[in-house]
Amino acid sequence: MRHIHPLAGPPRTLGVVVAARTGRSMADRDLGPGRPAVADGPHHRTEPQRVRLSSPPSVDPRRTPHDALAGSSSAGRPAPATRAARALAAVRDRVGPYVALTKPRVIELLLVTTVPTMFLAEGGFPPLGLALATLVGGAGAAGAANTLNQYLDRDIDQVMHRTKRRPVVTGRISPRAAVTFGLVLGAVSLLWLWFAVNPASALLTAAAIAIYVVGYTMILKRRTPQNIVWGGAAGCMPVVIGWSAMTGGISWAAVLLFGVVFFWTPPHYWPLSMKFRQDYAAAGVPMLPVVASDTRVAREMIGYTLAMIACSLLLVPVAGMTWVYGIVAAALGGWFLWSCTNLLRRARRPQGGPLRAMTVFHASITYLTLLSVAICVDVFLPL
């Protein structure tokens, strides 16, 4: 917040100037008519002057000397709003890097799939307390996994333009502080899910953390172009966690939801890898767009998209979804498939040109969000 300093000046000087000019004017007036006026200096011709006497400043009769002293003593003290802004900025500077470690935008996307799963498992609105407990525990666990991922990837993050501003890379958080924060946050989240939700959800969450941190980050990411396919299984776990939170177990409907997210992950992430392929190549990460042609990547994206559409439509007979959901799922799937085929067409152009791969990336997020909304709404529709 910008602090506007109060105007401060030497009032004594101003009083002397006014008194001098007033005294000289009074002297000129006392000379009377026909007497020369006092000159300002040699060779300076003067004329009779009019003096406009300003009225003295108004004085509040209720103001006491104590009030005056209090006002003067607080003149150099920052206003309460300024102190609050500075305190808030200090907290933001302290907490902000830890929040960035958790990758909040990734957590948002994970929770998008958890909520409709709970609606479908419950057959309506899930119990509010249980739903909130599940979301809080899931968000904490995802944040812990993302934090440990940034700790383990700090060597390649400093090479990649997309990740070189992460807190551990820039030194805003030390590696030791990051790994400590990740382990503590993960442990607290698992204990929370165990006691506030149920043991099954806590165990599934522990498996999700292990898949992402150990399976993907430590083993697959730097070794195989299919890293995001199998490592992406961690991103599918929120649907089974949400289902187990409501029912205490797993059903075929939860497996199909798992399949939707599993097959959605490659066509979601590979367009991003296409845009930043130079980053991944410099860091030595063999993402498929780094080691394969754009045509091959687009073809595989189409294959995964077809499998994703099949899983989404199988929810109609398996989970008892209505025909309204079926139409919406088919339309959304067809639109996303069209986006992938357009990418393949652009990749095949002999004259080259921009791939516009990020249009598929954004389309994937829109698809998953709208499909989740359709699941939530369909629960309340009559059969």
Image (tube, rainbow, N blue to C red):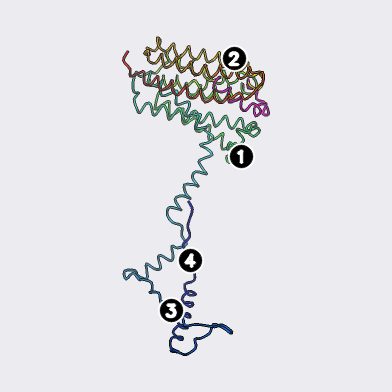
Q: Is residue 57 above or below residue 142?
A: below
Q: First in sequence: mark 4 or mark 2?
A: 4
How far is the residue under mark 1 from the one under mark 2? 38 Å
As for residue 269 lying within the magenta part, the answer is yes
How far is the residue under mark 4 from the one under mark 2? 72 Å
Q: Secondary structure at mark 4?
A: loop
As for residue 101 lying within the magenta part, the answer is no
Q: Is residue 7 above or below residue 255?
A: below
The numbered mark at residue 51 is: 3
The numbered mark at residue 299 is: 2
What is the magenta range?
Answer: 267-288
Q: Secondary structure at mark 2?
A: helix
Q: Nearer the viewer, mark 1 or mark 2?
A: 2
Which residue sits at x=43%, y=79%? 51
Which residue sits at x=54%, y=39%? 97
- x and y percent of residue 127 in the render? 34, 25
Q: First in sequence: mark 3 or mark 4?
A: 4
Q: Are marks 3 and 1 in contact (CB under 8 Å)?
A: no
Q: Which residue is mark 4?
A: 8
How far is the residue under mark 3 from the one under mark 2? 92 Å
Q: Nearer the viewer, mark 1 or mark 4?
A: 4
- x and y percent of residue 90 in the render? 50, 47
Q: First in sequence: mark 3 or mark 1?
A: 3
Q: Which residue is mark 1?
A: 170
Q: Amino acid at mark 2?
A: Arg
Locate the C terminus by quadrant: top left
Quadrant for residue 176, please give it.
top right
- x and y percent of residue 175 in the render? 60, 36
Residue reaching furthest front?
34
